[in-house]
Structures are given as structure tokens and as C-alpha cells.
Image: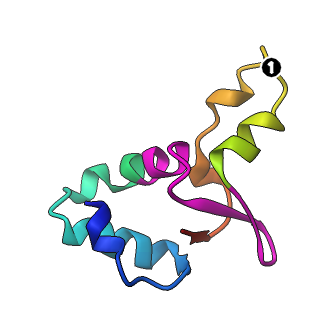
Amino acid sequence: MLYEFVGSKPVLTQEEVNDTILKADIPYSQVAQVVDHLCALAFLGVEIGTDEYRFAEDFQSRLPKGTGAQEETFRNYGSKFTI
């Protein structure tokens, strides 16, 4: 499935990420889960501000430990991603 991203622009909209995942024959019902997984693996970075992106290792290190905040999903942030 990662090969579908080969040749992609470095910054993608949510729709472009979804379309790329769907090209890999991933069912639509699982697209959000796959996006979360790709973010957790630090394959995708999430836009958190204008032209500012965070990857999983940055995101996790800034969350308070022991509060459950580390379980937060990435789909609550931004509408653009970077590879």
C-alpha cells in the first residue's frame, strides 16, 4: 500500500491521502484507521498550523504522560499531511 504514495507531492490533502489509500484496494470503511496507522508509524505528518507539521515522534513527545492523551488519534488535527 505504501507504494501507492511513490511519486506523490510532499504535501497532500485529506482527500488525496484517502484516494491514494483507496487505490490500494483498502475498503472505504477502513481508510480513517489506515490514516491513523500511517501517522502513528511516522509515515505521514499531520498539519498542526499553517505549513507546520508534526510526525508521531514529535506528537507523542509533547503529550502529557499518564493522561490518556497519548491515545489521541491524528484525524482530529489538520486537513493536510506531509510524507
**Side of 26 relative to 5 (left or right):** left
Q: Residue at x 62, y 29 (%)?
A: 71
Locate residue 78: give its quadrant: bottom right
Query: Where 42 sits versus 78, above or below?
Result: above
Q: Nearer the viewer, residue 21 or 32?
A: 21
The x and y percentages for residue 12 are 52, 79
Locate residue 62: give its quadrant: top right
Q: Nearer the viewer, residue 57 or 78?
A: 57
Give the number of callouts: 1
Q: For the N terminus, give its image quadrant.
A: bottom left
Locate residue 35: give its quadrant: bottom left
The disc labelled 1 sits on which kind of residue? Lys
The x and y percentages for residue 60 are 72, 36
**Side of 57 relative to 83 (left or right):** right
The x and y percentages for residue 15 are 44, 76
- Residue under pointer 1: 65
Image: magenta residue range: 35-54
The x and y percentages for residue 9 are 49, 85
Q: Residue furthest left?
A: 25
**Side of 66 relative to 8 (left or right):** right
Q: Secondary structure at mark 1?
A: loop
